[in-house]
Image (spheres, rainbow, N blue to C red):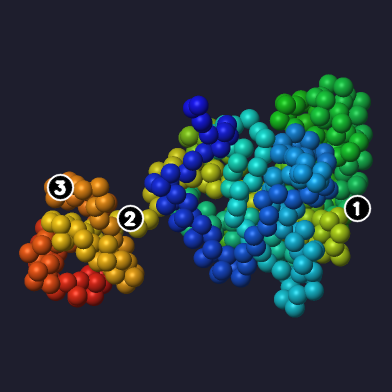
Amino acid sequence: MNYRIPRGTQDILPEQSRKWQFIEQKIHDLCNRYNYKEIRTPVFEQTELFARGVGDTTDIVQKEMYTFDDRGGRSLTLRPEGTASTVRSFVENKMHGWADQPVKLYYVGPMFRYERPQSGRMRQFVQFGVEAMGSADPAVDAEVIGLSMDFYRELGLSNLKLVVNSLGDKESRNNHRNALIEHFEPRISEFCADCQQRLEKNPLRILDCKQDNDHELMATAPSILDYLNEDSTDYFKLVQQYLADMDIRFEVDPTLVRGLDYYNNTAFEIMIDGEGFGAITTLCGGGRYNGLVEDIGGPTTPGIGFALSIERLLMALEVQEISLPIEEGLDAYLVTMGEQAKAVSPKLLHGLRSKGLAVDGDYIGKKMKAQMKAADRQKAEFVLLLGDDELAEDNIMVKEMATGEQKQVPLKEIAEWIISQR
């Protein structure tokens, strides 16, 4: 049988995995600077967690989740996003009682959505996400947005566009919700079946519809900014002021609606404009979700976060022809000639590796010339030439690949010699 990879997934081969490792290390370093701690949650959770946390009117819950019953008859779902799992852990582990508040967490891991695979959109994809829970200070909103912008900028991306909006507090959203129902209801039959269902449950989601985005009622729909109460207005003004103070350029877009039900107040997206993406494309999205912790069984706890796709980031780097500064190659490659030299190579390689050196050698009986070519392909800084004659004299010949210079070094001193050349 000819086995093939499942549709919407990918093999990340060694050449690409080095880029992933570099990006993941950038994430760890950046989050450490912002004092965010890593959290790792299960790949699958109870289905009800996502139905309640993400929202039963979202496309994710209605159409895209990988859900199955385990052998005990429990309904489980491969996580489609990271916030609900992180909030569940926050509640279950009583992080709201920790001395240091807000609790600032980040995660990097695979998510799963049954979508139509296309460029930058996979059925298994990797998200980097940040969550800060326990503070309603708009300065935390600015911090989270600043972290996401720093991440892209430090990787060298340009032509970034930050868009912000406010979805308002509960009172503001209710007033806006009623205005949306009044606006769309007389002609809702002209919209898709999904929008017709959303009218009463969550009319804000109609504004996020891709199928009906050209309908004339979309352009004239009531703006959330016209329904913000004083508290929500003041909050949004402070977020904008903090971003300006941080020299972070942004645009206010009153039509920005995040695709998940739990957002309120601050919402934002980071987009990139470039040839290869076509239209302006979203790289990152996030916002405030006051109320989500309570929905999942915890105490009243404000929160804010974002998530971004590593796959879409890699696409952006490729489009902008940005090469990551990845260190490649070996410290040394061992070339052996003769049976005795071959016999001692495992011990020699192991000793060099134990000193922290990246080394390799031949394991398939190549001739000397083929071994030298392998050393060149592996980008070895030095080639260690060991024959039976050198072994008898307890020496080894070292060739620097960049210059071609050669010299003999005592075999017992070879590790220290290579280290001294760094």
Q: Could one spot residue 318 in this view of the protein?
A: yes
Q: CA distance from mark 3 to mark 2?
A: 25 Å
Quarter of the view holding residue 149 = bottom right
Q: What residue would you read off at disc 2?
A: 328
User: What secondary structure is found at the residue carrying circle 2?
Assistant: loop
Q: Is residue 112 left or right of residue 206?
A: left
Using the image, determine if residue 92 lies above or below residue 53.
below
Expressed as whole percent of the image width and height from the top left, the position of residue 65 reads 72, 39
Expressed as whole percent of the image width and height from the top left, the position of residue 144 reads 65, 60
- Give the residue furthest to the bottom: 99
- Which residue lies at the image location 31% right of the left edge and 66% below the top edge? 350
Disc 2 crowd rating (10 Å Cα; few below 14, some 14-19, many 20+) is few
Q: Are marks 3 and 2 in contact (CB under 8 Å)?
A: no
What's the residue type where badge 2 is placed? Glu
Disc 1 crowd rating (10 Å Cα; few below 14, some 14-19, many 20+) is few
First in sequence, mark 3 or 2: give its number: 2
Q: Is residue 255 left or right of residue 156?
A: right
**Which sits in the foreground, 305 or 255?**
305
Disc 3 crowd rating (10 Å Cα; few below 14, some 14-19, many 20+) is few
Q: CA distance from mark 1 to mark 2?
A: 56 Å
**Which sits in the foreground, 278 or 343?**
343
Nearer to us: label 3 or label 2: 3
Nearer to us: label 1 or label 2: 2
- Which residue lies at the image location 91% right of the left edge and 47% below the top edge? 174
Expressed as whole percent of the image width and height from the top left, the position of residue 181 reads 90, 35
Q: What residue would you read off at disc 1?
A: 171
- Which residue lies at the image location 68% right of the left edge and 54% below the top edge? 42
What's the residue type where badge 3 is placed? Lys
Using the image, determine if residue 97 lies above or below residue 175.
below
Q: Is residue 6 left or right of residue 196?
A: left
